[in-house]
Image (tube, rainbow, N blue to C red):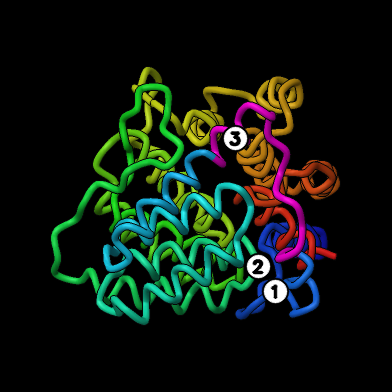
């Protein structure tokens, strides 16, 4: 190999390795920052929406008070508290539920979700792993929506949510192989287009993070234009972007016109990742920093951007 060719090969190798974030397994948040999130106000909602959410919480309290030994009513109380940003209270409700119903995977699934919200990723992983063991060999069940989509059709299940959130918690802590394994399991229970695009999106990003580009491309094969998506349109459009049907620039420009929602954060995070995969680090950093300048700190896109920026800095 001549001298010029050696230099060219070395530069390619360096650029390729730069696409993969330097990962360290384990929690990326210290206790001080976790406490900060426990006390941070929830993202703003309209006065009308808040009034409705508080009425739903009151309804959940009354239901639970009437039947305190009903695990389903306890879970709804925790969910209604969490929707209002009262995450620590929700975790307490779920923890009490675990003491009473240690065999009920739903409590670990929901508590794990709120541990992710508060950046307690290691605790979240413990809960989701426990939930995954509890559902082994059991039939799946539809998980009712607390905030229904426009068609009022639930698109996720208990098994789906356990594997999906476990994959996310591993992803956030840089445990890529474990995240990949979880998303593979999640794909098995992704029985509708919305579940499929949600799982495929994170699975694709995990594989790209691991520099397994050809495997990632195979995950795009079931994705096509014209799919009937009810609520995960952002993930769907990102997958179409990865297939080349939508340009990152057009998707970015369109999304920046409607920032300020959890959905727009999901798209922005996916675009930021696309820039990283393609060696455009400065553009990636710009998008990720713009995201965490907003107030949607409970969204998965925001949490992932925050974790990536910590590792990239």
Query: Of label 2 and label 1, which has the lower sequence position?
Result: 1
Quadrant of the image occupied by residue 127 = bottom left
Q: Is residue 129 magenta?
A: no
Kindly identify the residue that appears in the image at 38 percent across and 65 percent down.
Answer: 182
Residues in magenta, as a range: 37-54
In the image, residue 304 sits, relative to residue 97, either above or below, namely above
Element at badge 3? helix
Quadrant of the image occupied by residue 217 = top left
Is the residue under label 1 in contact with that under label 2 (CB below 8 Å)?
A: yes
Residue under numbered circle 1: 28
22 or 159, which is in the foreground?
159
Kindly identify the residue that appears in the image at 62 percent across and 57 percent down.
Answer: 86
Q: Is residue 260 left or right of residue 81?
A: right
Query: Of label 2 and label 3, which has the lower sequence position?
Result: 2
Q: Quadrant of the N terminus?
A: bottom right
Q: Is residue 171 left or right of residue 279?
A: left
Tell me how far mark 1 sits from mark 3, CA to CA: 24 Å
**Mark 2, residues whose alpha carbon is within 10 Å: few (<14), some, or many (≥20)?**
many
Kindly identify the residue that appears in the image at 63 percent across and 39 percent down.
Answer: 262
Element at badge 2? loop
């Amino acid at each position: 190999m001549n001298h010029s060719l050696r230099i060219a090969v070395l530069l390619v190798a360096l650029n390729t390795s730069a696409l993969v974030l330097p990962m360290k397994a384990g929690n990326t948040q210290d206790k001080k920052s976790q406490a900060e999130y426990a006390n941070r106000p929830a993202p703003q909602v309209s006065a009308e929406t808040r009034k409705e959410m508080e009425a739903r919480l009151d309804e959940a309290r009354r239901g639970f008070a009437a039947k305190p030994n009903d695990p389903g009513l306890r879970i709804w109380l925790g969910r209604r508290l969490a929707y209002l940003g009262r995450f620590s209270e929700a975790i307490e409700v779920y923890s009490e539920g675990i003491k009473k119903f240690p065999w009920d995977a739903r409590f670990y699934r929901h508590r794990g979700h709120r541990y992710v919200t508060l950046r307690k990723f290691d605790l979240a992983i413990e809960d989701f792993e426990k939930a995954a063991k509890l559902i082994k060999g059991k039939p799946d069940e539809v998980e009712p929506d607390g905030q229904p989509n426009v068609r009022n059709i639930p698109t996720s299940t208990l098994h789906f949510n356990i594997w999906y959130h476990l994959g996310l918690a591993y992803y956030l802590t840089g445990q890529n192989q474990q995240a990949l394994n979880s998303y593979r399991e999640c794909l098995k229970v992704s029985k509708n287009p919305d579940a499929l695009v949600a799982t495929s999106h994170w699975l694709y990003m995990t594989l790209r993070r691991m520099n397994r580009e050809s495997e990632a491309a195979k995950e795009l094969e079931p994705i096509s234009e014209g799919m009937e998506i009810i609520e995960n349109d952002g993930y769907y459009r990102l997958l179409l972007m990865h297939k080349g049907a939508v340009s990152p620039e057009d998707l970015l420009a369109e999304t920046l016109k409607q920032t300020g929602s959890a959905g727009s954060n999901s798209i922005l995070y996916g675009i930021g990742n696309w820039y990283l995969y393609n060696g455009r680090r400065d553009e990636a950093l710009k998008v990720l920093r713009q995201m965490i300048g907003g107030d949607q700190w409970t969204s998965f896109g925001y949490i992932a951007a925050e974790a990536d920026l910590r590792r990239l800095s």
